[in-house]
Image (cartoon, grey):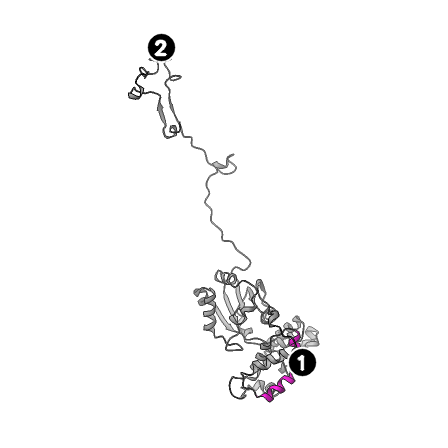
């Protein structure tokens, strides 16, 4: 019977052959030709057919069997998320800080390669306080897996850092820093040491906070408005990632808030500056020694360095207690004094920084 399915028409008849020898004649009677058989198709030799029935198709309201549903053409919809078509700003995801990354670098690479909006890389490079050039940074990114076409369509900006850190490290409220930066931008003032008593009076009338004025008005240190602010003005619908969370990334956040630029943070790709126990300093003397070692490559006389360390003794102590890296302390002073490497000190003094630089001498 397993062969029946391959035929649509059957006649139950046969002819004798060698295999039927001894069995007698094989009947091949036609309907009505044998007595006792009616003259119509029925029992006995039967003609029959398998008829393939066509099932009627329809929509869900027209059928009761799911097999009868009519095929419907559908368009596959791409899965979307809250980051689609936004400007992705990556902050200081660069080789110098790789040991601090608390996220899977290759998941970040995959995210960047598949991002469908604008892409920006902010970094600390050779034009500000780092050693990394833009081309070297791009090569490093491609070595990690960033696609070459992503590099070509991205923008890179050597942003530097520590422009708001004096207030941040002095535990000034973030909203107060944002308010001051916003007002400095409004009045086109780049350096807080240039703020007049009238400016401060207006600031207090707007924001009602005296502590930031008390910190900055007669201080040798300052906050300044970086070129980063102008760079960020052209971007909207922003998402940010990178780090360090409470340092460079926080400075970018303050800049965005001062510019009234809303943004989202990609928490899965934000890192913190966490010192491993093996890298921690046992006491402040070790911390101070590390600072001295980092100054050795710069043009600074030992006598000047000693005066510098004495002048900043309280800042060094605060840095030690708050896990601030010695390199951050050194980089800030090197930037201010325009120090180069090799030979004795020959600082590149800018007119606007004259008073600030002289205090180190």
Q: Which residue is mark 2?
A: 35
Q: Position of residue 291 (x, y in %)?
A: 60, 80
Question: 151 or 297: nearer the eye?
Answer: 297
Apparent side of residue 122 relative to residue 45 in the rendered image (left or right): right
The residue at the far left in this view is: 18
Q: Is 307 or 93 nearer to us in this picture?
A: 307
How far is the residue under mark 1 from the one under mark 2? 127 Å
> Taking the image as drawn, is residue 189 in sight?
no
Above or below residue 215? Residue 44 is: above
Residue 39 got which mark? Answer: none
Asked if the magenta segment contains residue 58, the reply would be no
Image point 58% across, 80% down: which residue? 330
Residue 79 at least partly seen: yes
**Of the image marks 1 and 2, the number of the one nearer the N terminus:** 2
Please give the range of residues in magenta.
Answer: 301-321
In the picture of the structure, the residue carrying the numbered disc 1 is 314
Q: Which quadrant is home to the N terminus?
A: top left
């Amino acid at each position: 019977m397993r062969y029946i399915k391959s035929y649509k028409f059957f006649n139950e008849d046969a002819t004798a052959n060698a295999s039927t020898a001894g069995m007698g004649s094989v009947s091949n009677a036609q309907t009505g030709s044998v007595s006792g058989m009616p003259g119509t198709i029925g029992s006995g030799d039967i003609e029959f057919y398998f008829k393939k029935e066509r099932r009627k198709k329809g929509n869900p309201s027209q059928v009761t069997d799911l097999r009868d549903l009519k095929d419907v053409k559908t368009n596959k919809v791409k899965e979307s998320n809250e980051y689609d078509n936004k400007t992705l700003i990556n902050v200081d995801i660069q080789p110098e800080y790789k040991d601090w990354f608390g996220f899977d670098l290759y998941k970040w690479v995959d995210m960047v390669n598949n991002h469908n909006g604008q892409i920006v890389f902010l970094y600390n490079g050779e034009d500000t306080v780092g050693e990394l050039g833009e081309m070297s940074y791009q090569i490093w990114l491609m070595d990690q897996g960033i696609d070459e076409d992503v590099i070509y369509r991205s923008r890179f900006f050597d942003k530097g850092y520590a422009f708001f850190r004096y207030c941040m490290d002095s535990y000034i409220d973030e909203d107060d820093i944002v308010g001051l930066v916003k007002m400095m931008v409004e009045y086109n003032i780049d350096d807080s040491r240039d703020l007049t008593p009238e400016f401060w009076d207006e600031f207090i009338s707007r924001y009602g906070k005296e502590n930031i004025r008390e910190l900055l008005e007669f201080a040798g240190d300052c906050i300044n408005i970086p070129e980063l602010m102008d760079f960020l003005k052209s971007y909207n619908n922003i998402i940010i990632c990178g780090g360090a969370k409470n340092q460079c990334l926080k400075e970018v956040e303050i800049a965005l808030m001062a510019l009234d630029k809303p943004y989202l943070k990609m928490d899965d790709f934000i890192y913190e500056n966490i010192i491993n126990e093996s890298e921690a300093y046992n006491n402040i003397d070790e911390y101070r020694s590390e600072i001295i070692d980092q100054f050795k490559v710069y043009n600074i006389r030992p006598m000047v360095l000693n005066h510098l360390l004495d002048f900043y003794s309280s800042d060094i102590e605060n840095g030690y207690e708050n896990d601030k890296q010695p390199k951050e302390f050194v980089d800030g002073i090197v930037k201010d004094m325009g120090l180069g490497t090799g030979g004795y000190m020959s600082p590149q003094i800018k007119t606007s920084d004259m008073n600030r630089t002289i205090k180190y001498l």
